[in-house]
Image: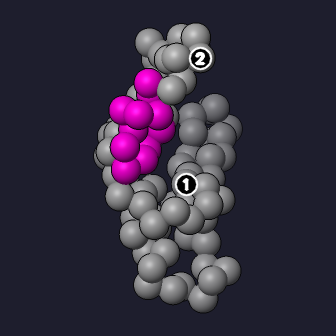
Amino acid sequence: MIVAPDPDSIRDRIDNHGADIQKLVTSKINTNDTWARDHAFITLLKEDATPLLLDFCFNGWGSLPQIMITGLMTNYIFTILF
């Protein structure tokens, strides 16, 4: 999955390098260019091997307002996948 302000250009670049993009999921979302470690699911496996997705919120920058846009990405991705 690729989420970016311009996912089509990224998809095209990956395709131009010969990668199989049949299963690639892209979605347009605004970001303020924080690192991927600043958001995303922490995935744990339950005893029955079903995933448990935890919403991670990196606050190492002191919860600055400008990182809040990207901080919403986890919920957005969840709505796309599930």
- Where residue 9 appears, as percent x and y from the top left, is 41, 34
- The magenta span reads 2-12
**Nearest to the observer: residue 24 or residue 45:** 24
- Where residue 79 appears, as percent x and y from the top left, is 32, 46
Residue 20 versus residue 65 in the image, above or below: above
Q: Which mark is residue 17?
A: 2
Q: Amino acid at mark 2?
A: His
Q: Secondary structure at mark 2?
A: loop
The residue lying at 63 percent from left, 83 percent from top is 61
The residue lying at 52 percent from left, 62 percent from top is 33
Q: Amino acid at mark 1?
A: Ala
Residue 11: within the magenta?
A: yes
Give me the C-alpha separation between circle 1 and circle 2: 26 Å
Here the colouring is one colour
The residue lying at 54 percent from left, 24 percent from top is 14
- Asked whether residue 46 is in view, the answer is yes
Q: Locate the C terminus and report the quarter of the image it occupies.
A: top left
Q: Which mark is residue 76?
A: none
**Nearest to the observer: residue 66 or residue 50:** 66
Residue 4 versus residue 50 in the image, above or below: below
- What residue did someone put label 1 on? 40
24 sits left or right of 18 in the view: left
The residue lying at 44 percent from left, 28 percent from top is 11
Please tell me how crowded label 2 is: few (under 14), some (14-19), or many (20+) other residues with Cα within 10 Å. Answer: few
Of labels 1 and 2, the one closer to you: 2
Q: Secondary structure at mark 1?
A: loop
